[in-house]
Amino acid sequence: MQLRTDLALEAREDIPGKIGGVSVLSSKKGDMKITRLRVLTDSAAKKLGKPVGSYITCEFRALTDDFTADDERIEVIGGMISELVPKSGCVLVAGIGNHNITPDALGPKAAEKVLATRHFTDAAAKSHGLDSLRPVCVLAPGVLGQTGIEVGELISGVIKKAGVSCVIAVDALASRSLSRLGCTVQISDTGISPGAGIGNRRARLDFETLGVPVIAVGVPTVVDAATLVSDLLGEKLSDRIPGSASRMIVTPREIDLLTQRAAVLIGMSINLALQPSLTAEELFALI
């Protein structure tokens, strides 16, 4: 049984020694640790189980400790998203997940915090002093069991109809470490597999399937039960853990607060990345 993680950083940590075709650069910003990992070759991608591309991971103090509208993490993560998003064109922000399942509700809740602007006419935007806004549309497509439609099919239709040049997909992730739940953000340009965080992986959303760049943003909210046992005991126990454990996930007791604050953090960070002419305070007021 392979210990599951959606974090490229953890996948790299699980492989001892040097891996050709992978570059890792770490830095500090206040009390935040930022790691930029790039998978450069197909062979490296196969070893890590992660597609070729860039992965930016930000680790910080737990969101359940404190969080305010002027939190510096919003600006830092907004800057990291800005690094990967094309500088022009309409952007579709897609909140992936099931709003009725708290550990999987990060995407829909984050979408509620994103400022939609595509519907603004030039005259209306100018009259409100918002004529510098980038066109953004927001979608919370639900899940297949709710709609009977694959998420990729819905997003593909919006891309074609709305003239979208880039998708930012927000989804809950799974970590192999308790210490990273609710205090880690991963941003990548490799797309996303909806439902990956709760073990219900659907067809990938990426450039190959949608025809536009797909920036994935996620926060780990769950750990596999089998992965949790191995993490706590400090050894891999894949041969001794029953297969039924792979169907169980564990989430923090304070998951409601964690998901809500993570959604605000991600939503406002996306706003800052897409609307650099506005301050965080102005964006909070508009939302």
Image (tube, rainbow, N blue to C red):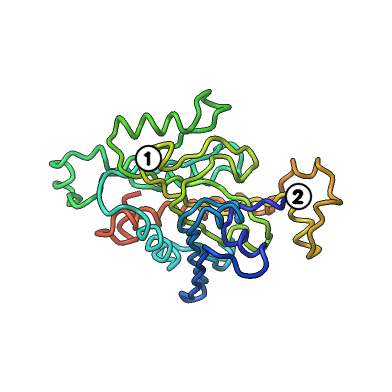
Quarter of the image where one finds residue 79: bottom left
Q: Quick one: label 1 or label 2, which is nearer the N terminus?
A: 1
Residue depicted at 51% across the width and 39% down the height: 204
Q: Judge whether 224 appears above or below 60 on screen.
A: above
Residue 78 location (% of width, % of height) = 39, 60
Residue 229 location (% of width, % of height) = 79, 56
Q: Which residue is mark 1?
A: 138
Quarter of the image where one finds residue 74: bottom left
Q: Judge whether 184 appears above or below 198 on screen.
A: below
Q: Residues within 10 Å of mark 1 (few under 14, many from 20)?
A: many
Residue furthest to the top in view is: 148
Q: Do tag 1 and tag 2 residues touch (Cβ < 8 Å)?
A: no
Q: Is residue 166 left or right of residue 181?
A: left
As rendered, which of 74 and 22 lies closer to the eye?
22
Residue depicted at 58% across the width and 56% down the height: 7
As rendered, which of 114 and 242 lies closer to the eye?
242
Residue depicted at 46% across the width and 50% down the height: 190
Residue 158 location (% of width, % of height) = 35, 32
Numbered tag placed on residue 5 in the rendering: none
Element type where label 1 sits in the image: strand
**Amino acid at pointer 1:** Val
Q: Is residue 257 left or right of residue 68?
A: right
Question: Of tags 1 and 2, which is closer to the observer?
Answer: 2
Q: Is residue 280 left or right of residue 133?
A: right
Element type where label 2 sits in the image: helix
Q: Which residue is mark 2?
A: 225
**Amino acid at pointer 2:** Ala
Q: Is residue 174 left or right of residue 234?
A: left
Q: Judge whether 57 appears above or below 285 on screen.
A: below
Q: CA distance from mark 1 to mark 2?
A: 34 Å
Residue 5 location (% of width, % of height) = 64, 53
Residue depicted at 43% across the width and 44% down the height: 111
